[in-house]
Image (spheres, rainbow, N blue to C red):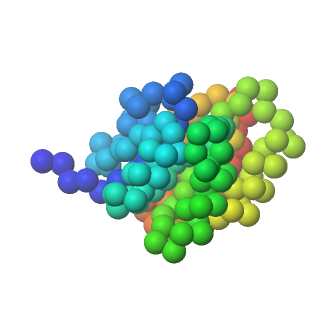
Amino acid sequence: MVTIVALILAILDEDTSNQTMAAIIGENNDLITAHTFRSALNALMNSKIDLVICDIGLFENQSSFTSGFDFLSWVKHDPELAHVPFVCFTVKRMINQPFVNGVRTAAKALGAESCIAMEQFDNILLETEVKRLLNGQQDQAFLDVAS
């Protein structure tokens, strides 16, 4: 029997597969995947989440959260949830430095522990960051990776 070390909430667009994310978080962690902010909110309210990973490129108009940054702000302003480490990531082709700087500045200002901007999805980078945060290294890390 495998002991679950952490419960991770991943808020993803439909293009990022659950299989990919499950491989990133490791076999000793459990994963809840949400494709809407409403389902992410339900998971946060009904489970003891140890880490949030959010694709900040996800937008929706059907809830009070229209972007990953709105959701991050809400989590970090809730006294019950503010301690939960939050990893923002974005995957954008032809990423440019002004975009990366803007994403990094917003994530840092809103309280994210980590922000990763990538031109192509890099599961090794994301896996390393998840392990770092789950091991208690809470210092902020803001990374950008250009292919």
Identify the image quadrant of the C terminus.
top right
Whether residue 138 is visible, yes or no, is yes
Whether residue 115 is visible, yes or no, is no
Which of the 4 quarters of the picture holds residue 5?
bottom left
Taking depth in this image into account, of 131 and 40 the one nearest to the observer is: 40
Q: Residue 8 location in percent, x, y?
A: 40, 51
Can you say whether 123 is above or below 141 in the image? above
Q: Residue furthest bottom?
A: 79
Q: Residue at x 51, y 74 (%)?
A: 79
Taking depth in this image into account, of 116 and 59 the one nearest to the observer is: 59
Q: Residue at x 34, y 57 (%)?
A: 46
Q: Residue at x 41, y 51 (%)?
A: 42
Q: Residue at x 42, y 56 (%)?
A: 44
Which of the 4 quarters of the picture holds residue 97?
top right
Q: Residue 94 location in percent, x, y?
A: 79, 27
Q: Residue furthest right?
A: 98
Q: Residue 51 location in percent, x, y?
A: 45, 56
Can you say whether 127 is above or below 6 in the image? above
Query: How many discs mark residues in the rendered view?
Result: 0
Q: Residue 118 location in percent, x, y?
A: 67, 36
Residue 52 appears left or right of 110: left
